Image: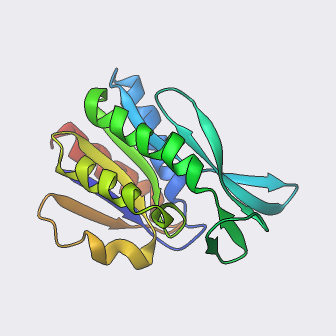
Amino acid sequence: MNIIITGKPGSGKTTLIKKIKNYLEKKGASIGGIFTPEIREGKKRIGFEIIDIMTNERGILAEKGAPGPRVGSYGVNLETIKRVGIPGIEKAIKSADYIIIDEVAPMELKDPNFLVKVEEAFSSDKTVIAAFHRKLIQNIKDREDVQIFKIDPKNREIVYEEIKSIIEGK
């Protein structure tokens, strides 16, 4: 079973995925995949980083005003997706117990090979826990091996408990 978490920006998708990651690690599971945290200067978001969970390799995914394909005011660094994002998912498919992908969104999809790796992860024998941009959920919602959770700040704890039950096989 694969788990997709979706919701509006600021709804807590990344927070929930980090909590699930910590829970799985406490159970002794190996985790692979990627995180894409915000880069902030004070209270202003100026970009996004991409981090390989298994190796902690990191790079700048996107920055305001940077060169590269545009998503809003951000320039996307395709080289970082190729160097950190795609290999992070590949390593997780090969050797992790669980694959975390935070997040599948327009920036990551500027490299078409990124979506290919996401689809490989979903088709692997590993459980994938992924955050999807709400407008991209159409691409994967019809899979029979996917359970989708739409979160907001009010139901985040309930969804966490439901996902823990799925992981435990209850």
In the image shown, does 87 or 92 lie closer to the viewer? Answer: 87
Task: Tell which residue pokes out farthest to the left in this image.
Answer: 144
On the image, the x and y values in percent for residue 63 come to 73, 60
The vertical placement of 41 against 54, above or below, is: below
- Residue 15 in sight from this viewpoint: no
Give the mark count: 0
Residue at screen point 50% across, 60% down: 108
Q: Quadrant of residue 3?
A: bottom left
On the image, the x and y values in percent for residue 136 come to 38, 74
Q: In the picture provided, is 125 more to the left or to the right than 42?
A: left
- Residue 76 in sight from this viewpoint: yes
On the image, the x and y values in percent for residue 65 come to 79, 68
Task: Tell which residue pokes out farthest to the right in this image.
Answer: 42
Residue at screen point 42% across, 59% down: 131
In the image shown, does 99 or 11 lie closer to the viewer? Answer: 99
Residue at screen point 34% across, 34% down: 92
The vertical placement of 29 against 7, above or below, is: above
> Which color scheme is applied?
rainbow
The vertical placement of 168 against 122, above or below, is: above
In the image shown, does 152 or 98 lie closer to the viewer? Answer: 98
The vertical placement of 108 against 141, above or below, is: above
Which image quarter holds the C terminus? top left
